[in-house]
Amino acid sequence: MALKRAALALAVAGLLWAAAAQARHGEDAARPHHVAGGFRNVTGAQVAKPFSWLVRWRVDQWREGLPQAPRQPTPVTLPQLQLLKANTEPVRRIAVQGARPPVPSATWIGHATVLVQSGGLNILTDPVFSERASPVTFFGPKRAQPPGIALADLPPIDVVVVSHNHYDHLDRLSAVQLNERSGGRTLFLVPLGLKDFLARQGIANVVELDWWDAYRHEGVEFRLVPVQHWSARGLHDRYDTLWGGWAVFAPDLRWYFSGDAGYSGHFAETRERLAVQAREGTLFDLALLAIGAYEPRWFMREQHMNPAEAVRAHQELGARRSLGIHWGTFTLTDEALDQPPVDLAAARQAQGLAAGDFFVLPIGGTWWAGTPPAAGAKQ
């Protein structure tokens, strides 16, 4: 009997210890990416590297003279501003009888910043319009060329989607200017933990989402989906805020935005979980997939896809077409600025994909889902 009581006491103590440990570490069976004080990757990948690895990378970079200078500048073209501004106007505030429906489009502004027109909305991804992706104006990665559309020249922005808080994806000054420009009407959709940051910048029209959460705005569904990455804006806030990609479903365009992502099973998981949205076996009409900042692989593999992995992500997402972004703008890693499209072409050929299945645009260039509106035509 004494042994039974002792065993029972030990069992109870074990349960209490396990419960305390779970509370201490913030474990949540329903939300395994939540931990005490922040978030984690559920893939087990070592995304945030030790400082010694960073030192090794920088020493190797200096010794080998990397990154090499690009052989040619990033392609740039004049944006179709008149068409873009006219494209969503009929459905913005009033119905215009006999007006032509807007044509879904995606315009690459640079790096991970894309203007997407869908569902009658102007949607901006990861806004960075400053000269440097840095907390300061005098140091840090500098733009190789200006944004494809200046912030002041954008059409009215209805929604901004943010993937995570790294400086090359969320620029404080750009967010503030977008908010001021719209008089606070622009809606910011962000991962958990970023609402407080934006509130400190005077931005109030913010909705936070967890992985798989959905939010509807004017008939368009925005869903935050998991990707393998991390977050930080300083030395002591790593993993404090969440990160993710975006699946956006409008009546005229279903599209995906990866933000930053290492290759993982999350792409196939997204296709499986959102399969109800698929049409004729295709989940997304267009995926915006990062293809740059991938060398050296021993350091970057877990946090940034290379083009070959981006092609796999394109296939696993069930995307009809993909646009390669996150290249040619900021020198962040060891490959030359112009190398990602070269590696993408090789990866595409290896998988038997046509050039139009996974393509790149010049900065300022626009992909149209149909025939673009004619300049000066009644919209």
Image (cartoon, rainbow, N blue to C red):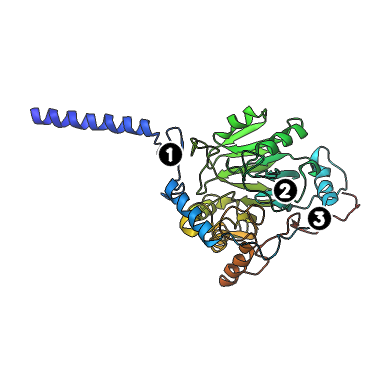
Q: Position of residue 279 (x, y in %)?
A: 63, 56
Q: Which mark is residue 30?
A: 1
Q: CA distance from mark 1 to mark 2?
A: 34 Å
Task: Where is residue 294? Give x, y as percent.
Answer: 54, 57
SS type, badge 1: loop
CB atoms at circles 2 and 3 under 8 Å apart?
A: no
Give the residue at x 23% y 29%: 13
**Residue at x 75% of width, y 32% of height:** 180
Looking at the image, the residue that sits furthest to the front is: 63
The residue under label 2 is 115
**SS type, badge 2:** strand
Which sits earlier in the primary sequence, circle 1 or circle 2?
A: 1
Neighbourhood count class around disc 1 (C-alpha, 10 Å): few under 14, some 14–19, many 20 upward: few
**Rendering quarter of residue 287:** bottom right
Q: Earlier in the sequence, mark 3 or mark 1?
A: 1
Q: Position of residue 248 (x, y in %)?
A: 64, 47
Discs 3/1, front: 3
Is 271 in front, or is 160? 160
Residue 78: mark in rendering? 3
Local crowd size for mark 3, using a 10 Å CA cut-off: few (<14), some (14–19), many (≥20): few
Q: Earlier in the sequence, mark 2 or mark 3?
A: 3
- The amino acid marked with disc number 1 is Ala
